[in-house]
């Protein structure tokens, strides 16, 4: 039987190269082998951004455009908006009732976010329950596999524990274990050398124009010991070289050679990289420009996606209600 994949992304801003080589490339491949359900999880976005919620609607649209432009195929996969399917909240309620507070308070991702995010107040009831809604997302579609980043592993572990507790408490076999599919691609750093993140504004976005890409690549930090053109470079400590490995692996050996033998300067090396990234993104940019003008098309994809998601969700909820209320 074909297995089901579920994953979600919070519509909190523009998608960048990290999302593409991290999550999306994986999601796209999984469409060949699995039934895929991909959710734009706006309630999860709201838990963090409830104080400035005004951008979420526009971000949902842009996210759908980005996904489709990159190759998420709405014919094969379900693309939908979480808040269009209220069953997510209903299942979250059932699961909340049986989730011990300690499981949530011990969650390392939760503790880290409370520590690190100081610009927003995340000491809320909903935010503590973030992983319960995530468990509901996954279990509603009875997903067997969940492509995620490493930081999400504690949430998946909680999902499995909640599923087991539900089954044993109500003497049913409704929810199975789900496995993580970890992304194998090396992590890309932002152009300032820090972790790529929208809050650092150091990412190349999928919607960036060629001019913006050139500008951002030009600003990339290179081997700090290479000051003069004649200095021999160390590609392994250079972020530019890391980008070549991902976006132009055919050129990897050439770059290594011209850098270590000082045959090309960093400015030229970066100019070539910018062209490579522009080429890499060209089909995505072209598709993006075409579909973003067609609002009705995108809205229709989301409408059909939520209808297909709802059909599955309703079935699961009938079984859940029967199991709990007998
Ligand atoms: N918490 C995930 C993240 O921040 C997003 C998410 C919500 C998710 N629901 C999910 C991911 C279900 C996988 C499955 O990346
Ligand atoms: Fe980095 Fe290229 Fe300069 Fe070498 S030549 S240090 S790889 S930018």
Image: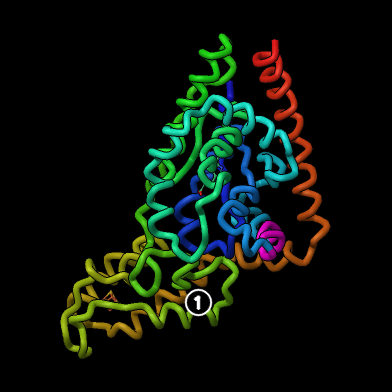
Per the image, the residue denoted by label 1 is 213
Q: Residue at x 18, y 88 (%)?
A: 230
Q: Is residue 139 left or right of residue 215?
A: right
Front residue (pair 182, 131): 131
Front residue (pair 49, 75): 49
Is 1 situated above or below 233?
A: above
Is 134 situated above or below 263?
A: above
* Quarter of the image that includes the C terminus: top right
Q: Is residue 80 visible?
A: no
Residue 59: in magenta span:
yes
Q: Is residue 96 visible?
A: yes
The image's colouring method is: rainbow
Is 72 situated above or below 317?
A: below
Q: Is residue 298 left or right of residue 62?
A: right
* Mark 1 surroundings within 10 Å by alpha-carbon count, few (fewer than 14), some (14 through 19), many (20 or more): many
Q: Quadrant of ligand 2?
A: bottom left
Q: Residue at x 71, y 30 (%)?
A: 313
Residue 312 x, y percent position in the rendering: 71, 28
Residue range (magenta): 54-61
Q: Residue at x 43, y 53 (%)?
A: 113
* Quarter of the image that includes the N terminus: top right
Extreme-right residue of the structure: 296
Callout 1 secondary element = helix
């Amino acid at each position: 039987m074909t297995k089901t994949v579920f994953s979600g992304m919070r519509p909190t801003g523009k998608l960048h190269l990290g999302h593409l080589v991290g999550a999306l490339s994986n999601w796209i491949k999984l469409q060949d082998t699995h039934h895929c359900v991909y959710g734009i999880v706006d309630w999860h976005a709201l838990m963090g951004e409830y104080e400035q919620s005004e951008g979420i609607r526009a971000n949902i649209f842009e996210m759908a455009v980005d996904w489709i432009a990159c190759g998420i195929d709405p014919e094969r996969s379900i693309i939908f908006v979480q808040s269009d399917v209220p069953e997510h909240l209903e299942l979250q309620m059932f699961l909340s009732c049986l989730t011990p507070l300690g499981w949530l308070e011990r969650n390392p991702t939760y503790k880290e976010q409370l520590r690190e995010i100081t610009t927003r107040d995340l000491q809320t009831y909903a935010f503590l329950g973030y992983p319960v809604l995530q468990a509901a997302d996954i279990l509603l579609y009875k997903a067997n596999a969940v492509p995620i980043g490493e930081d999400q592993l504690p949430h998946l572990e909680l999902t499995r524990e909640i599923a087991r507790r539900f089954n044993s408490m109500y003497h049913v076999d409704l929810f199975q274990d789900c496995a993580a599919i970890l992304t194998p691609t090396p992590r890309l750093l932002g152009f300032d050398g820090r972790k790529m993140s929208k809050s650092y504004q150091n990412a190349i976005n999928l919607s960036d124009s060629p001019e913006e890409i050139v500008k951002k690549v030009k600003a990339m930090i290179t081997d700090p010991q290479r000051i003069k053109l004649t200095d021999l470079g160390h590609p392994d400590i250079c972020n530019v070289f890391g980008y070549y490995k991902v976006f132009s692996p055919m050129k990897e050996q050439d770059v290594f050679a011209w850098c270590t033998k000082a045959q090309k300067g960093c400015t030229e090396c970066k100019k070539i990289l910018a062209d490579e990234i522009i080429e890499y993104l060209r089909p995505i940019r072209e598709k993006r420009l075409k579909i973003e003008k067609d609002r009705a098309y995108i809205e229709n994809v989301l409408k059909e996606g939520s209808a297909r998601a709802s059909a599955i969700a309703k079935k699961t909820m009938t079984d859940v209600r029967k199991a709990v209320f007998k």
